[in-house]
């Protein structure tokens, strides 16, 4: 069984540009989560999808971040426009139920 | 507020020595508890979890953790560390919501 995959693994962009991160969950997992870790800080929850619906987006930092999960399969997280403080590692996770969350390898975003 | 604390930022042990990584949580009720590990260049891998029942939980790679309600702790242990255990370890908790709250992580260095 394939695990959670994320693309790209690294992204380096200029401040003010747009970046889109993609997450493919484990097949059949209705729950999909985004987390991020900024430098030196703890991993923090961003949002939670159940199928294509946003269940909880209380962790989204501001309206420059937009997450979508069309069709309830893969998800994208767009940052527009990117700011310096958005640099960090963005993790995606999925789970079939409220049980264990399985994490992807993360996308390292650097905003210059 | 709900929180997870890992008091040790770095720990160095000699190969073959025993290991204990500390984790404390602050929740209104007993949360679900997890330990994840992130090896260099890898994603977060689940080591073990505690939901209820036996307070001593066995995980993968020879790790175990003990839930102590009186101390609000969920410390991770391994009797004999291998060089391949060098990684960053994260304690996490969640309540009835799906949102995981992470500690700040403990980076383990293994001396040959």
Image (tube, grey):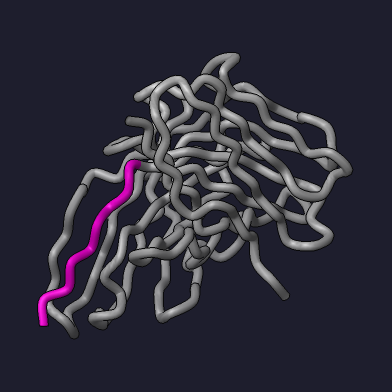
Direction from residue B94 to residue B108 in the image, left or right: left
Outermost residue toward the right?
A71
Outermost residue toward the top?
A63
Q: Position of residue B66 (x, y in %)?
A: 42, 62
Q: Which residues are magenta?
A: B104-112
Instruction: Tell me: residue A21, above or below residue A104.
Output: above
Give the image quarter of residue B80: bottom left
Q: Nearer the viewer, residue A105 or B16?
A: A105
The residue located at (57%, 56%) in the rendering is A103
The residue located at (45%, 58%) in the rendering is B35
The residue located at (60%, 14%) in the rendering is A63
- Does the stretch in magenta take in A42? no
Instruction: Tell me: residue B82, above or below residue A105.
Output: below
The residue located at (30%, 37%) in the rendering is A39
Q: Taking the image as drawn, is residue B83 in sight?
A: yes
Q: Position of residue A89 (x, y in %)?
A: 43, 44
Q: Position of residue B94 (x, y in %)?
A: 57, 41
Q: Position of residue A5 (x, y in %)?
A: 62, 59
Q: How many marks?
A: 0
- Magenta-highlighted stretch: main secondary structure? strand
Q: Nearer the viewer, residue B24 or A79?
A: A79
């Amino acid at each position: 069984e394939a695990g959670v995959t994320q693309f790209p693994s690294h992204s380096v962009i200029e401040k003010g540009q747009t970046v889109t991160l993609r997450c493919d969950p484990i097949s059949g997992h209705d729950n999909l989560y985004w987390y991020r870790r900024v430098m030196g800080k703890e991993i923090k929850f961003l949002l939670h999808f159940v199928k294509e619906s946003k269940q909880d987006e209380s962790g989204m930092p501001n309206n420059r971040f937009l997450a979508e999960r069309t069709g309830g399969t893969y998800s994208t997280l767009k940052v527009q426009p990117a700011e310096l403080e958005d640099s960090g590692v963005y993790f995606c996770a999925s789970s079939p139920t409220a049980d264990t969350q399985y994490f992807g390898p993360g996308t390292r975003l650097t905003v210059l | 507020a709900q929180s997870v604390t890992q008091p040790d930022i770095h720990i160095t042990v000699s190969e073959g020595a025993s290991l204990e990584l500390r984790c404390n949580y602050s929740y209104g009720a007993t949360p679900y508890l997890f330990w994840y590990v992130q090896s260099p260049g890898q994603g977060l891998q689940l080591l073990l979890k505690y939901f209820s029942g036996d307070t001593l939980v066995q995980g993968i790679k020879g790790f175990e953790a003990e839930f102590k309600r009186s101390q609000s702790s969920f410390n991770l242990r391994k009797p004999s560390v291998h060089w391949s255990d060098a990684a960053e370890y994260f304690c996490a908790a969640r309540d009835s919501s799906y949102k995981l709250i992470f500690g700040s992580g403990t980076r383990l260095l293994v001396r040959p």
